[in-house]
Image: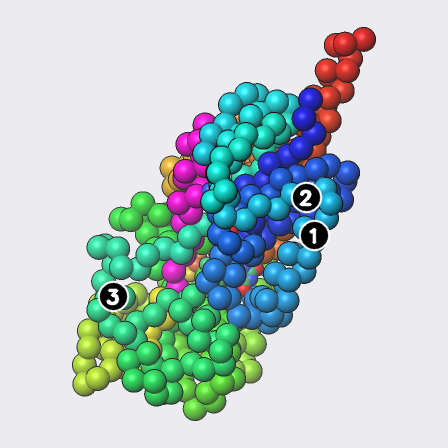
């Protein structure tokens, strides 16, 4: 009965799941398709984290240090290409630049995460690929990480910056009716950072309604308004066009019920979360059900938030839907306990049968 657990994905969820497995005396193989651990926050250059503005780099360093453990076999540039067997006795095929191996594992945790919504999709009218100064939250993160927030078109400091919320989320035409949970907080955090860097720059957030997650209301939203004078406007943006070297935003101020036309220097699209390619691929390889959006389905929710449709295969983090880091880390710990339990429960059952 193999006691090893395969963790697929080396982002925050996979790192915490592997660390938790080792903490409770299990063994893990952690596979990550990229050459480095850290997941989307690393790949997309997150700077400061919502809500407390702590460094994303420091947070990732802590998570990476947690998997330096003799009971965790970390394999980067590696992914899974095949799986057979059942709980307690899965045979998984792993592929890396050095070749293909088959490993025997008792249970599996899927931690393959999310990807940012592509704002250039044809239903979108924001001109992301047309206008250099229309950027996304992760594009802004990258500049903020370097403490250098400029108009990409000319390298000058912007005088007016607007965020547009719910890009790729809460959109029925697109089929993404869900809320991505973090983008209101992340936009407000970036707005604060821009105001700190460029005190003369006016920052506006155009929203359908602001959805601040838990304590983020007090930790981010009110400080953004009261201390940093970020202006929140309830409105819908229908079009962005170039005008006089700037960007003309057209839409409607829905509080005042009147048309909206304002000139901006930089427009930041608050893109939401979609299942990553890896999440979709791994679901197919493992034969686990996905929900209508492509995230891993949780048949037992709300009471069981880590079991997939296949016994012995669990899920953690944003692979199961939009999540902030706090929920990701909590879910990873729960998945680890259940994955170790599945292996040990199987081992106990096997021992009882042999007596
Ligand atoms: C713009 C933006 C900013 C955010 N900022 C914050 C913030 O400030 N604070 C906060 O709490 N949360 C924030 N979040 C949310 C945070 O990014 C997620 O909660 C977190 O990244 C989820 O971690 P994860 O490990 O589940 O997924 P990911 O971070 O996506 O990691 C998944 C990992 O799996 C790997 N992988 C995928 N497929 C395979 C495969 N087939 N084989 C092997 N490996 C694979 C990927 O390469 C990746 O390393 C933000 C989200 C967005 C969209
Ligand atoms: S968190 Fe805010 S911006 Fe993101 S989808 Fe939800 S309401 Fe829209």
Which residue is at the front of the view, 261 or 53? 53
Mark 3, secondary structure of its residue: loop
Query: What is the quadrant of residue 209 in the picture?
Result: bottom left
Residue 80: x and y in percent read 49, 36
Residues under labels 3 and 2: Cα distance? 42 Å
Query: What is the quadrant of residue 59 in the picture?
Result: bottom right
The residue at 55%/82% (across/down) is 227
Q: Is residue 125 visible?
A: yes
Query: What is the quadrant of residue 86 in the picture?
Result: top right
Residue 244: x and y in percent read 18, 85
Residue range (magenta): 270-287
- Residues packed near mark 3 inside 10 Å, few (<14), some (14 to 19) or many (20 plus): few
Using residue 153 as the reference point, say whether residue 188 is left or right of it: right
Q: In the picture shown, does residue 42 fall above or below 348?
A: below
Whether the residues at callouts 2 and 1 have beta carbons within 8 Å, the answer is yes
Q: Residue furthest front?
A: 98
Residue 68: x and y in percent read 70, 52
Q: Residue 129 has which mark?
A: 3
Mark 2, secondary structure of its residue: strand
Q: Residue 199 has which mark?
A: none
Q: Residue 68 has which mark?
A: 1
The residue at 49%/57% (across/down) is 40
Residues under labels 2 and 1: Cα distance? 7 Å
Whether the residues at callouts 1 and 3 have beta carbons within 8 Å, the answer is no
Q: In the picture shown, does residue 172 fall above or below 136?
A: above
Is 330 included in the stretch rendered in magenta? no
């Amino acid at each position: 009965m193999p006691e090893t657990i395969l963790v697929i994905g080396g982002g925050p969820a996979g790192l915490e799941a592997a660390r938790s497995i080792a903490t409770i005396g299990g063994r893990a193989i952690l596979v990550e398709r990229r050459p480095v651990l850290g997941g989307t926050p690393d790949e997309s250059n997150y700077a400061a984290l919502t809500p407390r503005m702590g460094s994303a780099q420091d947070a990732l360093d802590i998570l990476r240090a947690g998997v330096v453990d003799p009971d965790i076999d970390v394999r980067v540039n590696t992914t899974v290409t095949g799986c057979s067997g059942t709980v307690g006795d899965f045979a998984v095929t792993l592929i890396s630049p050095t070749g293909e191996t088959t490993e025997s594992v008792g249970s599996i945790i899927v931690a393959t995460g999310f990807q940012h919504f592509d704002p250039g999709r044809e239903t979108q009218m924001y001109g992301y690929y047309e206008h250099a100064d229309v950027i996304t939250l992760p594009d802004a993160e990258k500049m903020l990480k370097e403490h250098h927030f400029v108009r990409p078109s000319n390298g000058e400091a912007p005088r007016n910056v607007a965020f547009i919320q719910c890009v790729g989320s809460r959109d029925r035409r697109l089929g993404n009716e869900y809320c991505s949970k973090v983008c209101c907080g992340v936009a407000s955090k970036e707005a604060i950072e821009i105001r700190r860097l460029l005190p003369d720059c006016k920052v506006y957030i155009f929203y359908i309604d602001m959805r601040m997650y838990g304590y983020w209301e007090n930790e981010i939203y009110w400080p953004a308004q009261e201390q940093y004078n970020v202006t929140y406007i309830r409105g819908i943006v229908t079009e962005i066009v170039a005008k006089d070297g700037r960007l003309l935003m057209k839409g409607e101020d829905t509080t005042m019920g009147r048309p909206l036309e304002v000139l901006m220097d930089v427009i930041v699209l608050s893109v939401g979360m979609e299942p990553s390619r890896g999440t979709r691929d791994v679901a197919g390889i493992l034969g686990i059900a996905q929900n209508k959006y492509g995230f891993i389905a949780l048949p037992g929710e709300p009471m069981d938030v880590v079991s997939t449709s296949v016994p012995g295969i669990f899920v953690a983090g944003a692979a199961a839907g939009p999540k902030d880091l706090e929920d990701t880390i909590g879910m990873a710990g729960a998945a680890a306990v259940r994955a170790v339990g599945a292996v040990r429960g199987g081992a106990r059952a096997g021992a009882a049968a042999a007596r």
